[in-house]
Amino acid sequence: MGEHDTYSAGRLEAELNVLIDDGVRVVVDLRDTEFIDSTTLATLLAACREAEQAGLGFTFVLPGRNYTEVNQLLDLTGLGSRFAIFETLDKALAAARGGTTRGDSVRSAA
């Protein structure tokens, strides 16, 4: 919740690595996140690639109705389409269970 920056990126990286190494599908809930920096974004991108290589799902929950700095960073960097982003936890969980890691059919309420 809140802000994620270089200080917290190392811990996030370690936690994501453990989950992926254990074969766990990952859903990153960004609903209460107001800010992430480039280090955190790079950490999430690397974890997404690792999950994809392992055949695991890796999705985000990030509602579009509350356009935050996180939405803005993903839009400005062009990485929003790289991640599988869903507006609800249920949709993100279902997609992760199905092995989704890419943003081809995401950011939809459908």
Image (tube, rainbow, N blue to C red):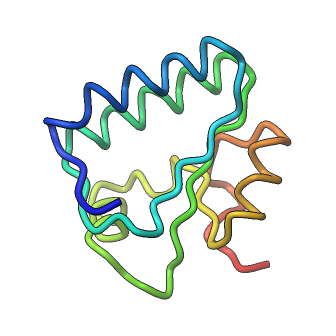
- The outermost residue toward the top is 21
Which residue appears at 47% of the width and 68% of the height?
31
- Please tell me in which quadrant of the rendered image residue 108 appears: bottom right
Q: Name the one closer to the observer, 96 or 107.
A: 96
Quadrant in the picture for residue 5: top left
At a point 20% along the width and 44% down the height, the residue shown is 38
Q: Is residue 41 left or right of residue 22?
A: left
List x then y, in percent, for residue 11. Answer: 31, 27
Front position in the image: 61 or 76: 61
Q: Residue at x 78, y 51 (%)?
A: 95
Quarter of the image for the C terminus: give it: bottom right
Using the image, determine if residue 6 lies above or below residue 71.
above
Pick out the residue farthest to the left: 7
> In the rendered view, does 50 fall on the left or right side of 33?
right
Q: Is residue 60 left or right of residue 110?
A: left
Which of the 4 image quarters holds residue 87?
A: bottom right
Answer with left or right where residue 63 lies relative to residue 55.
left
Task: List x then y, in percent, for residue 39.
Answer: 21, 37
Relative to residue 94, is residue 12 depicted above or below? above
Q: Which percent across, then down, holds residue 40? A: 28, 40
Residue 14, percent across and down?
A: 39, 20
Quadrant (top left/top right/bottom left/bottom right) for the N terminus: bottom left
